[in-house]
Image: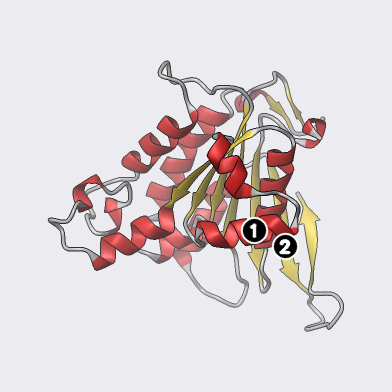
């Protein structure tokens, strides 16, 4: 199973006119079964949601979390706290304080990710997947596409330090690295959102593999909901 887990790649998932989150659950279960450590930065759903889907896929996420194989960062809870709590109630320690403080960046969020997956020396402790669900949430909450792109750039350098030597023709890195990234970005064709479009272009540049999930051009079908393309 571990052979199916791709190293040294930044896999970008985009969806248009359909829901591509099923691929998030696919990669989460794949890497957990493959014995990798997984850091899930959940910006769109609660742990209960991922755990319920994981049980259907035969992956007990609660057990993986208790063993330390799964590190869960509750970005959804952090974002809610920024909008529901008074500034004096610990917002200064919130990794998503950039949602309210326009002078702040996502550096605290990056530092949190790094402490979850790295040793004291700042290196990955074995094969590790960073799974981000999903980046479009940050843009919809007011974070600029540039700040989100900068955050993912530093995550890419941390997780895939050899990615600059990636061979697109052979579809493999020139050197094996210990990490991988999978992230979801929405790209709905019927919505005009310049910031999110900018974010998608930045992520498409950073990514080594692009999985595009699209609704059927012919419209709704009871049996087939859409199509997936690999770029």
Frontmost residue, 94 versus 33:
33
Q: Position of residue 20 (x, y in %)?
A: 67, 63
Q: Within 10 angstroms of label 2, few (less than 14), some, or many (20 or more) residues?
A: many
Q: Which quarter shows the N terminus?
A: top right
Q: Nearer the viewer, residue 142 or 58?
A: 58
| Direction from residue 28 to residue 147 in the image, left or right | left
User: Is residue 76 depicted above or below 224 in this figure?
Assistant: above
Q: Is residue 121 above or below residue 226?
A: above
The residue that mark 1 highlights is 14
What number is the disc on residue 111?
Answer: none
The image's colour scheme reads secondary structure
- Secondary element at tag 2: strand
| Lower sequence index among marks 2 and 1 | 1
Query: Which residue is situated farthest in the right direction here?
Result: 223
Pick out the residue farthest to the top: 121
Q: Quadrant of residue 189?
A: bottom right
Task: Calculate the distance from the C-alpha at mark 2 to the C-alpha at mark 1.
Answer: 6 Å
Occupied quadrant, residue 212: bottom right
Whole-percent x and y of residue 128? 60, 31
Q: How many numbered marks, from 0 up?
A: 2
Q: Nearer the viewer, residue 173 or 23?
A: 23
Q: Specify the label residue 213 is tagged with.
A: 2
User: Local crowd at mark 1 within 10 Å, few (<14), some, or many (≥20)?
Assistant: many
Residue 28 in percent (x, y) is at 66, 47
Q: Secondary structure at mark 1?
A: strand
Asked if residue 182 shows in the view, the reply is no
Whether residue 224 is visible = yes
Identify which residue, 198 or 37, lies in the foreground: 37
Please say if 102 is above or below 120: below
Mark 2 near mark 1, Cβ–Cβ under 8 Å? Answer: yes
Q: Residue at x 74, y 44 (%)?
A: 30
């Amino acid at each position: 199973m571990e052979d199916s887990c791709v190293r040294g790649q930044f896999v970008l998932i985009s969806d248009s006119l359909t829901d591509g989150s099923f691929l998030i659950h696919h990669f989460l279960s794949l890497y957990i079964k493959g014995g990798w450590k997984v850091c899930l930065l959940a910006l769109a759903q609660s742990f209960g949601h991922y755990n319920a889907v994981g049980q259907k896929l035969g992956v007990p996420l609660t057990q993986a979390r208790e063993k330390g194989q799964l590190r869960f960062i509750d970005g959804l809870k952090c974002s809610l706290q920024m909008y529901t709590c008074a500034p004096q109630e610990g917002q200064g320690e919130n990794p998503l304080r950039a949602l309210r403080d326009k002078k702040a960046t996502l550096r605290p969020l990056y530092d949190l990710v790094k402490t979850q997956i790295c040793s004291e020396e700042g290196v990955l402790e074995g094969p590790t997947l960073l799974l981000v669900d999903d980046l479009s949430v940050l843009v919809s909450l007011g974070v600029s596409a540039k700040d989100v792109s900068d955050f993912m750039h530093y995550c890419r350098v941390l997780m895939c330090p050899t990615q600059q030597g990636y061979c697109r023709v052979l579809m493999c890195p020139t050197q094996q690295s210990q990490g991988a990234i999978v992230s979801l970005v929405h790209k709905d064709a019927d919505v005009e959102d310049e910031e999110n479009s900018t974010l998608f272009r930045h992520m498409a540049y950073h990514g080594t593999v692009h999985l595009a999930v699209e609704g059927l051009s012919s419209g709704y079908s009871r049996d087939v909901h859409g199509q997936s393309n690999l770029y």
